[in-house]
Amino acid sequence: MPNSNRFEDPGLATLKEIGAELGLSPATVSRALNGFPEVNVKTRDKVREAANRLGYRPNRVAQRLVTGRSGMVGMIVKIRQDMSADQTFFEMLTGLTAALAARDVDLVLAVDQEADPLVAYRKMLERDVLDGFVLNAPAHDDPRVAFLRENDIPFVLHGQSGDAVDYPCFGIDNQKVSADAVRLLTGLGHTRIALLNGKVNYAYAADRLEGFRTAMADAGLGAVDGFVGENAETESEGYLQALDMLSARDQARPTAFVCASTLIAAGVIRAVKDRGLRVPQDVSVVAHDDALPQLRAISFDPALTVTRAPLRDACAPLANLLVDHLAGAPPVQQITRAEMIVRQSTGPAPIEERTPWP
Amino acid sequence: MPNSNRFEDPGLATLKEIGAELGLSPATVSRALNGFPEVNVKTRDKVREAANRLGYRPNRVAQRLVTGRSGMVGMIVKIRQDMSADQTFFEMLTGLTAALAARDVDLVLAVDQEADPLVAYRKMLERDVLDGFVLNAPAHDDPRVAFLRENDIPFVLHGQSGDAVDYPCFGIDNQKVSADAVRLLTGLGHTRIALLNGKVNYAYAADRLEGFRTAMADAGLGAVDGFVGENAETESEGYLQALDMLSARDQARPTAFVCASTLIAAGVIRAVKDRGLRVPQDVSVVAHDDALPQLRAISFDPALTVTRAPLRDACAPLANLLVDHLAGAPPVQQITRAEMIVRQSTGPAPIEERTPWP
DNA sequence: CTGAAAGCGCTTACAG
DNA sequence: CTGAAAGCGCTTACAG
């Protein structure tokens, strides 16, 4: 009676039962089902057929007890006012749960509202038996990384938090993201280029800033030619910052914007129009595109030129890197390059800009 | 080697070890730790001291295997465009994980993007061994309820989906929510009262509508005196609907609004001001307040009169009702009444309205 | 009041 | 290629 998991009732088949049905030991059934090479092909097929027929579903809890792993990894979400963060959160949640499920591991979520980012991790570790963590939205030299490494707790990092790391991580090269955008624009003749960046305490934004500066310098443009706006996250923040930068006189305002997100680009485009200017004739706009389904860069007016790296595409690598590492594989770091997609929001720098009046 | 859960390394104490330390059997240690009445008080204290000292933490997986429960309940989130839904989602997530954690159960989350609400449940049941579900945002006669009941899967419902139910649920009386608001307003002399409601396919909104109509009728006011706006979820939807209703001539426009949420109330107040009217002198506003931390009704200008029922307060009851039911307790239905808090956004109906020109 | 035993469902050396 | 056995850490009738 205590042992009646209601959900397995219909097919409460166990290894023992399948074995009995077939005149085999549970051990052989286990090996057959788990694809051990030594089992006879015929036996394997017989076993699989019977398992199917009886609706066998392995008992995860038993598997976990014997393997010593909990089959659960944790993720802690930091709640922000900014609603755009929620969109990316849902995107990651959807992708990660699916990718982890494919590897038979559950994602346990907790919400962090504390000032100290570590307390949520400590609490979660006290409460739950977890095999590891997915770390998101890292800062440079993120304290959570140090904490987890000190305590020998496996994790995978989404993005990059430092150099010469010895833990698994997956992300895009954010320096190249803005460098590529700048190169595209300087190639079109732009010199006064603005960056509307996210919060630089995030590593991704710090890297974007670094890449922006380097690429500007490489193009022979100094700090004076660059406009940097920080902490932009929402459409209206993008709007307001762009509006402000565009209020300068002709020769002093940017002719191009590099935006941290498509949401910000939406605000920038609105600001350009409100200033009576046109995209891309007067102002070019490039953005980084996480490819959130709600906000399609191709549907912008004009269609948005982007560096594109779907957030969703990071989920399976993150899940696999972590699960492989948990199974003993050495940690692998994988940094990919975002794709550049040129659409209608970028064009040559306006003529008058090329030959400034002395 | 396979059995080295890294997280228990520091205190990989087991019942057997505590027993060995004390010259007791694991069985007695188990009983002492679980507070069985039959154990000698001295023994119990000794055991607890030792457990503490050795940093004992019960192995959940083993407990789950032997009790036949997985210790996990599922919740499926339906993603909507509307960002306000995300706020309430995070609020529920925070509260539920905490409340469930206190009962040693984990919340496993999945995201639903399908048209058919049942497929997400089926998929989750295939994949995970779950003890039950938390059902949120029910419709009237929600198909998920029928599905889970048919399959004998325990769940707790947040809200009400029908009458004479035999499953645990917790929520507020939504008919009373709008009835209370209407009564407050009619008591202040208002006759032309608008309801800006949420999507009526949700049970809560259907109930609010019902309560609104009944209370209007009870006050001797007919359908003609009531203005009903539906499907309002965001601030701007509230704004637009109110703007529209307020465009009517003096004798035809509402003098009071009952809003489904504080977010909508924010839009309504903005619309009132944009029409050159004042709250509460010309138009009174009442809203239902879920007490989301981001949106404080008391900080509105003017401070908002509300029916108040913090969403957070529903989490512990939901968790406990479900966990108790899983443990064999009979299902209990608990419907509470939202509190009415009168602040500055409601006032007497404008004088000229009381004596309409014939 | 306490202990020895069985068992949850699985995996995996160890034999054969 | 397959089986018998031990064991993961816990709980809980059953004895005493």
Image: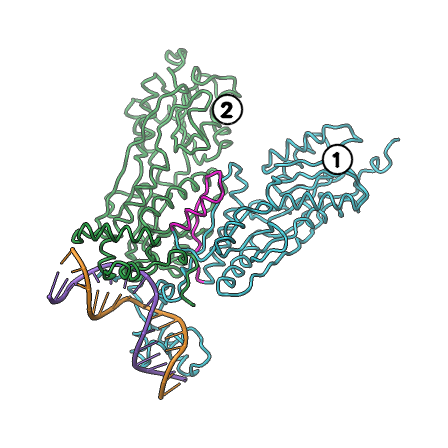
Chain colours: A green, B cyan, C purple, D orange
Q: Which amino acid does the dot numbered 1 rest on?
A: Pro
Q: Is residue B5 visible?
A: no
Give, as a three-letter code, the residue at label 2.
Answer: Ala
Labels 2 and 1 touching (C-beta < 8 A): no
Q: Secondary structure at mark 2?
A: helix
Q: Nearer the viewer, residue A202 or A83?
A: A83
Mark 2 neighbour density, 10 Å: few (under 14) some (14–19) many (20 or more): many
Query: In front here: A347 or B250?
Result: B250
Give the distance between the C-alpha atoms of the residues marked 2 and 1, in whole angstroms.
36 Å
On screen, residue A100 versus residue B333, left or right, reads left
Q: Please give left or right for residue A229 compared with residue B210 in the image.
A: left
Residue A218 percent across, percent down from the top left: 28, 25
Q: At which x and y percent is residue A193?
A: 38, 23
- Position of the N terminus of chain A by quadrant: bottom left
The residue labelled by disc 1 is B254
Q: Which residue is mark 2?
A: A271
Magenta segment boundaries in residue numbering: B104-127
Circle nearer the viewer, 2 or 1? 1
Residue at mark 2: chain: A
* Chain under numbered label 1: B
Image point 47% across, 37% down: which residue? Answer: A84
